[in-house]
Every structure is written in C-alpha cells, then in structure tokens.
Amino acid sequence: MEIFFTDKEVNEYIEQAKSTYDQIRPDSDFNIIHDPQPCPIINFVDDKKGKWIWRCHIDTENPNPQAWSMISDYLSLYDALVFTKLEYARKTSHDLIYQIPPSIDPFSVKNKDIPEAQARDIVEKFVPIDLPLVTQVSRFDPWKDPLGVIDAYRIVKEKQPIRLVLIGSLAHDDPEGIEWLKKVKDYAKNDPDIIILSNLDGVGDLEVNAFQRVSKVILQKSIKEGFGLTITEGMWKKTPVIGGNVGGIKLQIDDGKNGFLVDNIEESAEKIIYILKNPKKAKEIGEAGHIKIKNEFLLIKHVERYLDLFEILSK
Ligand code: UDP
C-alpha cells in the first residue's frame, strides 16, 4: 500500500528540517547532511560557501514516489550525493554520486577486542553456554524477519541442540518495536531455548560484543537492509555470519567465502547446520570475514573515502 503525505505532513517535515539548522555550521568547508529528515536544510542556507553533501543511509532503490519527488528538489542543490550502494541512487539524476558504505570503529566498546574468558562470563550472565548459540542482534522489525529466524531455528533444532538468542534494542517511545517484540515472544511460545533480550535487560554495547564473539553463528536474516552493521560487527569478530541476500549485506558477504547469503528459511537452517557441523570450515570463514572487514569497512577506510571525495570536490 502506497503511503500518501498530506500538505500538513509535508509542511511539518520541512519545518522540522528547518529547526535543525541551528545545529550545523553552514560556513564549514564541507557540510554533510545525513538522511531524508534534515535534507531540506540546504534550502535555508543564505550564503552557500563550502561544499554540501547529502549522505543517504537507507535503501532508496524503490522509494515512495511522492517522498522521492519532494526530496529530489533539494538533492539538486547539493554538490554531491553519497549512497551506501550505487544501486540506491537509481532514481536520482545528479552529476556527482558516490558510493561510500558505513564502517565500524574497532576500538569502540561494541567492537574492541575482549578476552574469550571475559566474553563467556558476560554471556553466561544471560544464557547458559552448554549448547551452541545462534544469535541475531537487531531491532524488532519485520524487515529483520525475526519470525523467519525462529522458523529456521526450529528446523535446526529438530536435527541438533542449539539455543537461539534474539537481541533487540527497544525505546520506550517505539510502539512498533514493542508491538513486534510481543509478536516475537508469542511466536517463540515459551520455548526455553529461545532467549529474547533487549537493552532493557541490560544488554548494552559490551554485552552485544560478547554475544557476537561467543555465538557459533551470527544471523542477520533481513529481507531488506541498507547496509547491516550487525553483519560487519559479526564478521570483524571472526564469527561465521549468515545474512539475507539483500541490499548492503551483499556488499559485505561473498557467499561461501567469508559468510553465507541466504534467500529463505530453509537455506538459513541448512547453513546453520553446515557451520555447526564443520568447525574447521567455520573457522576459515570467520577468518576470511575478519579480513574483508579489515580491508573494506573499518573507520580508517571510511575516512579515506571521504577524503577522496573532498579532494574531488575541491578541484
Ligand atoms: N544494536 C544493539 N543492540 C540491539 C540491537 C541492535 O546494539 O539490541 C546495534 C547493532 O549492534 C548495530 C546497530 O544497532 O550496531 C544496528 O545497525 P544495522 O545497520 O544492523 O541495522 P539498523 O537498525 O540500522 O536497521
């Protein structure tokens, strides 16, 4: 169903963007405006001095036509546009369009190295680790397909004992997240081997880090995904990652080499079983995943890509 925005909603959007003008320094050499929310801000700049870049983090391959047409008026005012994947710019006509994917900071609490024993101690506060853990870390959201993850777990569970951990952050003011958490809990039907955790249980960055290390498999069975930082985070930690064959996940995983791309529930289950049954191969895949992230998706590479763009814009 196509959503249609009323004039009132469009005005609210523009007013909200305008209200964020105070938060920027429009006289900077480079101004990078992120995502659709503040995009119209460029229209309120009096004396455009530096270069203006719009950085889009979402998958805009098939955007809502009305929303895209509205955004397009502003995009033409920017000096360059940056997308996670060039495909996301399909509906855009602009001379300077760049692909710059996101990255992770290897020294952040979420990604820093922690000793194995410490990681196990942290995880054991929440879940026993006598069985292999298969973990998905993501918002409770239909595009992350948490119900499909439970279906895949059930297929695996018939063949071998595992525990499924679903970790999702929740905000008190996120009614959709709360609704989806309930759906997921109902679907899990009190299965003691499905453990559902959130930030409200005390699972923060360090705990996510530990789960991503201790788990035998990191799953991100998304059906739509702009990039998928949880893929990057899992691969960085040398844990075999299985991801949905969509969007930004395809930039990161080379199927069969440094992770697995899956198209459905059955394939997800099949790859989980493969990883659990082939520890040597799982280790190789984990190592290859780490190298891919090291070369392509760490902060340092991200800075390098931006500096290249600044250089082009300065000519
Ligand atoms: N995340 C987290 N706790 C949770 C769920 C998610 O810390 O309970 C983090 C996750 O580690 C990642 C980010 O939130 O860093 C989610 O980014 P991603 O690109 O995977 O998905 P998005 O939520 O942006 O669609």
Image (cartoon, rainbow, N blue to C red):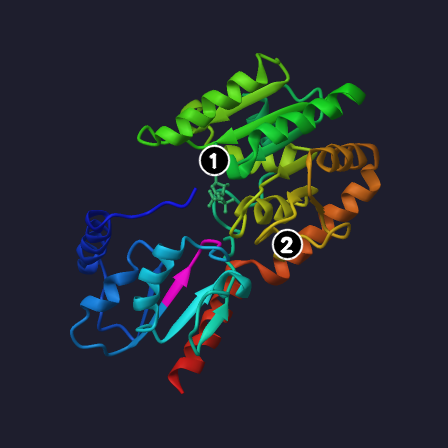
Q: Position of residue 245 (x, y in %)?
A: 65, 48
Query: Quadrant location of residue 71?
Result: bottom left
Disc 2 from disc 1: Cα separation: 20 Å
The C terminus: image quadrant: bottom left
Is 277 left or right of 20, judged from the image as shown? right
Say which residue label 2 marks. Answer: 250
Marks 2 & 1, CB-CB < 8 Å contact: no
Which dot marks residue 106?
none
Amino acid type, callout 2: Lys
Residue at image coords 41%, 53%: 64
- Secondary structure at badge 1 equals loop
Disc 1 residue: CB within 8 Å of ligand 1: yes
What residue span does the magenta drawing correspond to? 54-59
Disc 2 residue: CB within 8 Å of ligand 1: no
Amino acid type, callout 1: Arg
Say which residue label 1 marks. Answer: 139
Q: How many marks?
A: 2
Dot 1, how many residues are within 10 Å of its Cα: few (below 14), some (14-19), or many (20+)?
many
Q: Position of residue 301 (x, y in %)?
A: 54, 65
The N terminus: image quadrant: top left
Judging depth in this view, the residue of 19 and 290 nearest the camera is 19
Q: Is residue 281 above or below residue 23?
A: above
Specify whether residue 35 is in view: no
Specify whether residue 68 is in view: yes
Judging depth in this view, the residue of 236 and 267 nearest the camera is 267
Q: Position of residue 284 (x, y in %)?
A: 78, 48
Residue at image coords 32%, 28%: 172
Residue at image coords 49%, 71%: 98
Q: Position of residue 267 (x, y in %)?
A: 74, 37
Asked if the magenta segment contains residue 174, the reply would be no
Asked if the magenta segment contains residue 57, the reply would be yes
